[in-house]
Structure formats: C-alpha cells, structure tokens
Image (tube, rainbow, N blue to C red):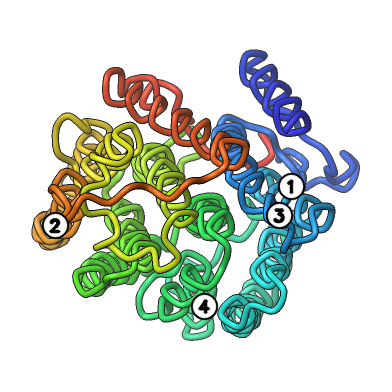
Amino acid sequence: MAGLLGALAIVLAQALGGTTLRTFCVPAELAPKGGSAPCSLVIDPFALTIAALVLVSALVVVLLSMTELADGHIPVGEWYFLLLCSITGAVLLPASRDLITLVVALEIVSLPVFALTALKRYDGRSSEAALKLFLVSVVSTAVMLFGVSLLYGLTGTVYLDRLGLAAEPRPVSVVAIVLVVAGFAFKVAAVPFHSWAGDVYQGAPVPVAALLSVISKAAGFAGLILLLVLALGAQVALWGPMVAVLAGLTMTVGNLLALRQRHAVRLLAWSSVAQSGYILAPLGVAAAGTAGATGAPGAQAANASIAYLVFYAAMNLGAFAVVMLVSKRSERNEIDDYRGLAFRDAPAAVALGFCLICLAGLPPGLAGLFAKIVVFREIVGGGGAVLALVMAVNTVIGLYYYVAWTARLFTPPPTAVEAPATSTRITTPVAVAAVLAVAVAVAFSIAPQAVLGLLPGSLSAAG
C-alpha cells in the first residue's frame, strides 16, 4: 500500500509539472533528418492518466487482497509480489512508444495474473480458471506478435510514430492490422474473443477478478489506443469499421449473457464484457473524430474511451468490493443470496445498489449516465448512427439485470435471516475499499468535469 501511494504521488507530481518526459531515445546523430529522435518511453498526459487510474484501482485491489489472504490459504509474499509486478506492467504500458516495449509491458501485466488466479491451492475451480486464462492469453499473444512482426516487416521500424503504412494498404497490411486488433480483443474480452471471461472471473479470487475487470482492461485498451490512434491513424478507414463491428457485438453478446446469470461474479464478468463494447465504440467512428496535436484523427475518440474507462473503474470496483463482502458470508454467492441485504447490512446494500445504478446509467448514479453520454455524443458526432442505435438498445437491456439485482437488495427476505458472524478484522479492509470506490463514484456523479477536464489532449510519440 505504501509503495502504491508513493508511486501515485510521483504520478501526480509529474502531472502537475506539465512536462513531457522521454527516455530510451535514439541518439540525435542517428535520428531521421528533419525529424525528432523517436523514444521508447514517453511520459505524457495520456500515460499519466492511465497510470493514475491503474494505481488508484490497485489501492482498492490491495484492500480486497487483505481480506482474501486472511484465511491463510494463499501465500502472502508471493501474492503481493505478483500483484505489484502486474501493476508495474500496467503503469509502464501507456508510456510505451515502440512495439517491443508495448508487447513486453502487456506480458508483464498478463503473466502474473495466471499465478494469482491459481494461488488458492487445492481449489479445482481456481486451477481450471488459471489454465483457461493461460491458454487464451498465450493464443492471443501469439496472434498479436504475428501481426506486430508483419508491421515491422512492412515498415522496418518498431517505433509507433514511424509505423506509416501505405495509404492504399496491401493485403499483408490488412492481415497485420486484423491480427493486432484480434490480439488486443482477447485481452479486453471483446466478442468473439470473450469466452474465457465467465469461468475465469468466477474461478479466480475476487481481487483477481477485480484486477482483470479494471486494471488489465485499462492496460489492454491503452495498448489498443496507442496502436490504432498513434501508430495506425492513417489507416483509420480500414480498422474503424472493424472496431465498430466488434463494439456492437461485444455490448450485445455481453448483455445477453449477463441476463442469464445467477452467480454474482459471473454476472459482473459478462457485464464487464458489455462495458468493453461501450469503451470500444468511440474508436469505431474515429475516422470522423477531431485530430489531436499529433494529427491523429482518433484522438478525440480515444479521449471518450478513456473517460468511460475512468468512470467505469470506480463503479465496478465498488460492486466487486461488496460482492467480496457477501462472498465471505455466503459460499454460493448467487444473486438470490443478496435478497434482503438491506435488512442485514444496510451500508453494503446502499453501496452495491448505488454502483449497480451507476453501471446502468440511472440517477442518482450520474457517473454512469455521464460516461454513456460522452460515448454516445462521440458516436453520433462521428456519424455512427447504427452503432448509436445498437448502444441505445443495449443500454435498455443492461437496465434489466442491474435494476433486478438492485431490487433484490431491498426486497424483504422470505424469512428473517441473520447475517453470519464475520470477523471485523477481516471485513474492515473490504469496507474501506467499498467506501473509497463509492466515494469516487459519488464525486464523479456530482462533478463529472473532474474527469473530463483532466483528459489528455493528444498522444505524444517523441514530442
């Protein structure tokens, strides 16, 4: 916790300084004539925004971990080491400005999660979840690396700001872009690369599920934005429609699968898939977006995706915190177990209800409503009428399961049931995590400009 707070303080100090920092740059004498020297790591507003999101989310995950580790079934040292490794990769990734650093950072995010999922020893479901996550991640990495190798072969460079493909793409260029997008689609659980999400979220410890739903997703989207907007912005007419189709499929399939769920974590898993569709949607109409300082036509669309991601992180982490609290009292952790929660633990019911209403985009959870408005405005402004209609329909579908779950919280149980006794020492960190996440969601609901005003104006390559 102290390490995360220290890292967050450094990120905030860099943000207040307002200076773009660069390192691992090509020597000036080897730089292209008339151009700036490309760098492998650039700390700009985009990198700082994602890093701050990751670090604040990590604080919540660490608080959840304290309760998960209290029963002694998971080795503490290994858990925190692996957790910090994954967070390090997530902080490094948005600052990456070459293909090699980008891929390495993405693997630093992913590899420790396999072990974190399986650290609950002698638990068959956790082992199964870890194996599924490992196999899917290996396949996605192989697919993405194949696409990355083709990009390098076509351009002769690994630096993102130098990956200029021909205006008229050859078939091999199309294949490269499709493979890269498919590889990242695995990482963010976009349809049709989503099948692992339900089983992995349910089988993993709840803090790992929260990490996958927010931190890993943030890293995946950061990498996707860097590749599409910064490196392949000139090919937006090629990848824009592809991403739009992925977004529409993702939000639709995720919501339809969430309708059928009876397990709390599985419902949040498929809900998270649907939320990925909303985050992808602005990138699907990036061709008509406003160019940033780098000339990238998708810069404004990227800002809309980042804004939704920030809003979503607070709402989803709050929901996971309360779900973990209930999981310590009910082994099944099914939706029916939440019936009458307001009569057993009113603060927990209010916190979960507020987060679910936020995710649905209903008042008083205005954070979710503002997030959807930002994305919807960008889609409509970009001429994506069909995608906007699909999003509107999916928002209505999502209302059903979010509101149905919220209604259960305040429905009197059929019989008076006392909450099982749980040690205060165990539940206190989860309560603090829930309070932190809900407080941020409330702040975003009251003052959404706190997010919108801090969004990066553009992506920096080498300055």
Within 10 Å of disc 1 (Cα), the crowding (few <14, some 14-19, many 20+) is: some
Circle 2 sits on which residue? Answer: 414
Kindly report which numbered mark, 1 or 4, lies closer to the viewer in this rendering: 1
Residue 302 at x, y percent in the picture: 41, 45
Circle 3 sits on which residue? Answer: 86
Q: Is residue 406 visible?
A: yes
Q: CA distance from mark 1 to mark 4?
A: 32 Å
Residue 253 at x, y percent in the picture: 25, 74
Mark 3 / mark 4, whichever is N-terminal: 3
Circle 1 sits on which residue? Answer: 88
Circle 4 sits on which residue? Answer: 173
Instruction: Please tell me whether residue 293 is drawn above or below residue 82 in the rendered image.
Output: above
The foreground one among 97 and 185 is 185
Contact (CB < 8 A) between labels 3 and 1?
Answer: yes
Mark 2 / mark 1, whichever is N-terminal: 1
Within 10 Å of disc 2 (Cα), the crowding (few <14, some 14-19, many 20+) is: few
